[in-house]
Image: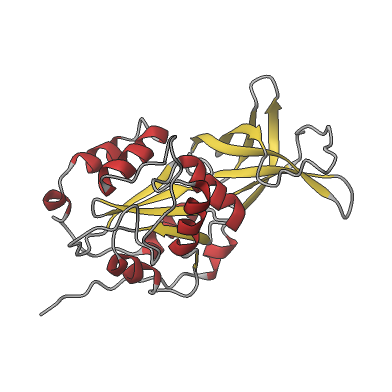
Amino acid sequence: MVKFLLLTLSFSLYLFAGVIKTPVLSVDHASSIATIQVDRVDVGVSGFIVQRLSQRTSSILMSVEVIAFDSATKTATLKMLPFTSLTQNSLPSGNWSVEVGDIAILAFGYSRAILIAPTEDIYYKVTKSTSQVQWLHPDIFTTFLSFNGHPTPLQEDFQQIADTAAIGLIFFYVNQHIFTVDAKSMKVINITKAPLKQENVQLPFYSRITEIDANWFGEGSSEMEAYEPYYCSLLSQYNPADKDLHKICSLNIQETQKGESGWSITNIYKSLFQ
């Protein structure tokens, strides 16, 4: 008798009110650092800083990424970076700079996600379990990769599709685990064991589009050779100190299938916002 894994994805409303909005407490322009006060936030969560220019007008000044969180003082340290998501060279740009009292907005777009999965069965077991998460279909990403000529997706491909489709999270199903990754920073903010039956793999990930146009040469122009090693390498590149990531990626498929089979995407989201 086949035993099906129940994927519980009945999200509460608070998940979609999970965007963090809080004033900037301090700014150090020399080191491009700002601080905010927040009850809890994971290192790697990205966002931006907004400055209100008038009662009806505001401007996004900088992108930010959480690089440290002090649970004792409830203080998060943000690294400020140029905001490039809405670049428009035809429009004038202001000379405003981040000031104390401006608003930091974190975890924006976390209710929109894409799932990178090795098989159709795994993809649908996860995504069809809820109608409350807005999933970007992998066919769209595959088309995007063909336009870029990248049969092997690069970090910049993920960031470009995140900007284009306003995606906040990328879920990678690798070695029987779900890696929850901030789409901007590429930092792993949650790892959950999720053993699901996997008999084969589609490269570079499940999509109904099986052919991706390739450039003649350059990074990403070659076809992916192996699913798990590639995505483990990609995630390790942006998470070099993540010991759990490295341990999971070092295991073979038989070892990762051992252990409890119960898991919940709901709990993944709870860990992000509680």
Residue occupying image coordinates x 52% and y 63%? 15
Apparent side of residue 21 relative to residue 71 in the rendered image (left or right): right
In the rendered image, the residue lying farthest to the front is 216
Q: Position of residue 22 (x, y in %)?
A: 67, 46
Q: Nearer the viewer, residue 228 or 225?
A: 225
Q: Position of residue 185 (x, y in %)?
A: 51, 40
Quarter of the image where one finds residue 236? top left
Q: Position of residue 144 (x, y in %)?
A: 51, 54
Residue occupying image coordinates x 38% and y 33%? 237
Q: Tally the numbered discs.
A: 0
Q: Is residue 144 visible?
A: yes
Q: Is residue 40 visible?
A: no
Residue occupying image coordinates x 16% and y 51%? 253
Apparent side of residue 27 relative to residue 207 in the rendered image (left or right): right
**Looking at the rendering, in which quadrant would you find the N terminus?**
bottom left
Q: Nearer the viewer, residue 60 or 90?
A: 90
Apparent side of residue 260 relative to residue 225 in the rendered image (left or right): left
Quarter of the image where one finds residue 90? top right
Q: Is residue 220 above or below residue 138?
A: above
Q: Nearer the viewer, residue 245 or 34?
A: 245
Residue occupying image coordinates x 28% and y 73%? 6
